[in-house]
Image: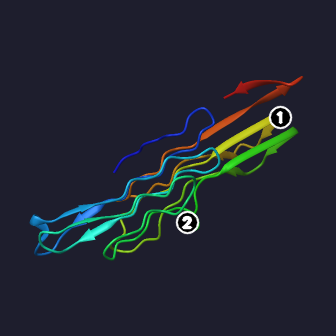
Amino acid sequence: MELDKAGTNRATGGGGGGEGKADGAGAPATISYGGAGAAGSSYSGGSGGGACWNYRTNQNYYGGNGVENGGAGGYGYNGAGPGAGNPSGGTGGLLVIYAKKMINNYQIVSRGSVPPYDEHNYAGCSGGGSINLFYETFEKSANSVIDATGGRQTYRGSGGNGSITKGKMIEGTFIQED
């Protein structure tokens, strides 16, 4: 499992790769490959790769790759589940807010998601989104959150983190803040 294609510079995160599992009587002579996660696009986190479960002798099986540009998660093969994507589970998206005065009392999120669980689903999670906040003044409560993380769960390929950009707009000029 890998954390790849992490978002930077207002980018979204890539989807995590699916995992291949081989077990049963034929496991030593079989190969099982999970699908690759897709790269994030300008408006959507990447979809996760599909899982593959193989219990047959001397046969190789492959999970599907995540579909590019915010598409579906990769197909699961042989009883294994699909990766997270659109419409199944969703991905982090593009969020742009421009306000004179912004007050964050709770959460601003654009997270990746986790594929549905079943005992043979080791599919990839989707990538986080891109959060862009532009304001003249910004206030937040003590418990407020801004989050663009990729989907995460044990035994699955993690989605890449998206990005958070926030800052002041003063006389048409953007000044980035942490």
> What SS does tag 2 mark?
loop
Of 176 and 146, nearer the camera is: 176
Q: Which residue is mark 2?
A: 89
Give percent across and percent down for residue 131.
Answer: 68, 43
| Mark sitting on residue 144 | none
Mark 2 or mark 1, which has the lower sequence index?
2
Using the image as rendered, state which of residue 151 and residue 53 is in the foreground: 53
Mark 2 and mark 1: Cα distance apart in space: 31 Å
| Direction from residue 83 to residue 138 in the image, left or right | right
Label 2 amino acid?
Gly
Residue 135, labelled with which disc? 1
Circle count: 2
Q: Nearer the viewer, residue 84 or 103?
A: 84
Tell me which residue sits at (43%, 63%) in the image.
74
The image position of residue 157, as x and y in percent, is 39, 54
- For label 1, the crowd category at 10 Å Cα-Cα, with few meaning under 14, some 14 to 19 and many 20 or more, is some
Report the residue at 57% width, 55% height from top.
70
Say above or below: 141 vs 77.
Answer: above
Q: Residue at x 25, y 65 (%)?
A: 21
SS at badge 1: strand
In-front residue for pair 135/55: 55
